[in-house]
Amino acid sequence: MIDLEKLQTILKEYKRDFEQRWPAERYKWEAVYCFQTNWDFMARDFEEMFIAATAQTKDLLTSVNYYPRGVMRGFAAVNRDATRAMFSRLYDEKKDLTERVEQFQEAAEQIRREYGEGIWKQHYQKLNAISIYLWLRYPDTYYIYDYSECRVVAKELGSSFIPRRGAHAGNLIGAYALYDEICDVVGADLELQQLFHSQLQDKCWPDKKARTLTIDFCRYISRVYSKKGIGRSDSDWLPIDYSPELTVADWLDLLQDDAVFTESSLEVMRRLLDYGGMATCRQLSNKYGEPRNFYNFCSVALAKRVAEKTDCNVLNTDDEEAKWWPILYMGKRDEKDHEGGYIWKLRPELEEALQQTDLSRVSLYAYVSVLKGPHAAWWFSVNPVIWSFSSLDVGETLSFSLYNENGNKRRIFDHFLEARSGDFLICYEAIPVRKIVAIGKIVKESDGENLYLEKIEGLVHPVDFHTLENIPELKEMEYFANPQGNLFKLSRNEYTCIMDLIREENPVDHKRIIKPYTRDDFIREVYMTRGHFDTLISLLKHKQNIILQGAPGVGKTYTAKRIAYAMMREQDDSRIEFVHFHENYTYEDFVAGYKPQGAGYELQYGIFYRFCQRAANMPNKSFFFIIDDINRGNVGQIFGELMLLVEKAYRGTLITLSCNGMPFSVPKNIYIIGMMSMADTVPIRDYVLRRRFGFFELIPEFDSDGFRAYERHFDSDTFHALIERVKDLNKEIAEDPHLGRGYRIGHGYFCGQTEYSEEWLMEIVDYEIMPLLSEYWPDDPEKVRHWGNVLRSVFYD
């Protein structure tokens, strides 16, 4: 049950604000209409259909740190049938909802692990995303579920149901019951229905059951009403008994003063207002970009300018920072402390003034630059056979002639004269590439002969032309009307739309808390002697490509990642890529190639190509590409012409790719680490590869300082005795003419345990070491039995 009287009170506020909110919230009804129009479960190209059907979902399925739509698109690209089956089960209304939700998430994780390990850190198919898929498909039945939003709504309306962490699908069921109660009231309100239908436009879902209207109403409760402080005391907000004594009119005057409200200040204000009027610096940073200190610094600086301009009342305190921000906000400690330590809430007068001010020209997201002038940016199209943005380094500047090879003016010559320093460029490569490949900017205006450009970012995932063609907001683009030429105007909306598409696949790399990593950390974790470590690092620096080889269980994979940490001197997994070679791995998977797409074929870039693009965007940082079982792939075929480029002497050298005839280079800041077991029956036969890689053998390190400390930690005579017997076993394996050093038992079998138990040791002997010995000596069962008795005897001494 809910508080119906409170519900009616909020509903009055909602109806009062409805017309003002509608332009920003209409997209939800448009999203349902778009989905219903484009969804075709049996479409041959499921990926293309899914993107078209969800084209209007905007921030619902894509935001700065949340990418369910982009990952689902990737799933459809790598396994169309499995992705189709996911939605088939989810949309089967004959089955239990909880079961369907759990199966959907399990299937998403399975596809991620099978095809996207190292590409997708997570699948993002959380309850929120799944509820959106259900709502889009059955808009007269389901609602959008958001954990935080539902908690606020439930508390505001005094519901007996409050979602709780860990309840998962149970939260979904409870939320739907809560929303059904709310929907009954919303749908029966004739005044609201008239308001809604008066705003309804073509390509909007009619929403006869008022489910989407209920979703919007609940969002209003969470993001607007709950932040206003209506009907509650502000006694828990600080500072108490202080006010700058500025009216709404005062704030409106200040907002028109560019010397007070600078561009950065307005960005902070718009983002805080968009978030609902109160947020922590971390929440603003996570959603809109910029470091947390940006919001703190800008707020304090703005408050000082306001005080200087108005001579307003300032809080009397010795804390220099604490005396300024209360001019703009009230604040309190975040009780949950999971999104930042301190919450700011806009002062009511300032919030009302901001709501009355047109902030549409202010950048909401840090990655979308709002420029002055009649247009937001330029579409820059080039013939990649003659001139390519892909081949430029980030930060490289060059001149582009205003005249073609024949000395004639380029088409739409006036555009080159209108372009100004600082204008952004959407860099598009025409046939045969037909993709947006980079973002650039104009660094110097036309001098009558040339325009001067700079590449500021290469796209790891270029944006396909056919994707742009399906976006309604881009249908009037100047380039689409006549693609002949190089420089085309983009409206502000077109630029923002394209940047949204770019960021969906190329998200902003926000600054994260990255732990330092030292040489001592490596020695402590990897159980390698300091001498071996110094040799290993020296070899990698000298060759830039190494292969770690060794016996089973010496920790090659574990070591490879920590080599990268040690070289970077920090634990930054975003600069590490991991792949596994197998007999079916191809050049198309690794570099690029044409793959089936709809009725034809389309050029798609492989994992190493994309990794090189990422590394090129950060030339001052080291990147590490790790290849497991490098010997199990056809290395010459997989690398192709890149076999030359990975050699240190040829890093940064441009060659023409065979797949598309385009220039490409391997950046100098990439290190390649391959791994192979010396006990593997598949050797490396490509001697060209051997010449380009250094080979380093990892050996069992039972006598290293690190492993001995690990052994002493357990203080177990049984553990010590077993290790001594394994060392004896290794001597016999090394002396066997059919085996040798590469078949010894590695220390890794015994690592990673935090609590000691004899059952753990027994499992290692019976289920890991003994099966290995049976493979080593298949024709000598007596020897296998002997060593089984020797190893097991430690448990009975």
Image: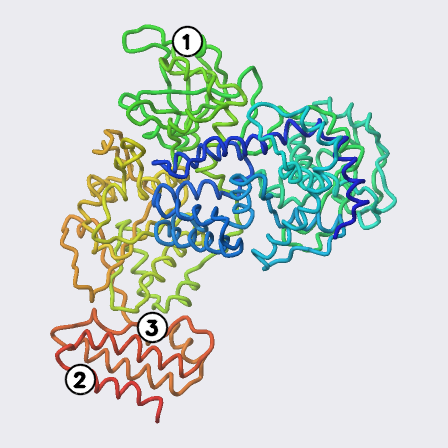
Kindly identify which residue carries mark 2.
Answer: 783
User: What x and y, as percent, mark residue 294?
Assistant: 62, 39
- How far separated are the C-alphas under marks 2 and 1? 84 Å
Kindly identify which residue carries mark 1.
Answer: 412
Q: Residues within 10 Å of mark 1 (few under 14, many from 20)?
A: few
Extreme residue toward the right, this view: 241
Q: Is residue 550 above or below residue 601?
A: below
Extreme residue toward the bottom, this view: 797
Query: Mark 3 is on which residue type?
Result: Tyr
Which residue is painted at 48% across and 32% down in the image? 55
Where's the C terminus, which quadrant?
bottom left
- Give the mark nearer the N terminus: 3 vs 1: 1
Q: Are marks 2 and 1 in contact (CB under 8 Å)?
A: no
Query: Mark 2 is on which residue type?
Result: Lys
Residue 644, by quadrant, is top left
- How far separated are the C-alphas under marks 2 and 3? 21 Å
Which residue is painted at 39% across and 34% down in the image? 48
Query: Mark 1 is on which residue type?
Result: Ile
Kindly identify which residue carries mark 3.
Answer: 749
User: What x and y, as percent, mark residue 150?
Assistant: 66, 48
Extreme residue toward the top, this view: 408
Depth check: 166 or 404 in front? Answer: 166
Q: Residues within 10 Å of mark 3 (few under 14, many from 20)?
A: some
Which residue is painted at 44% across and 55% down in the image? 106
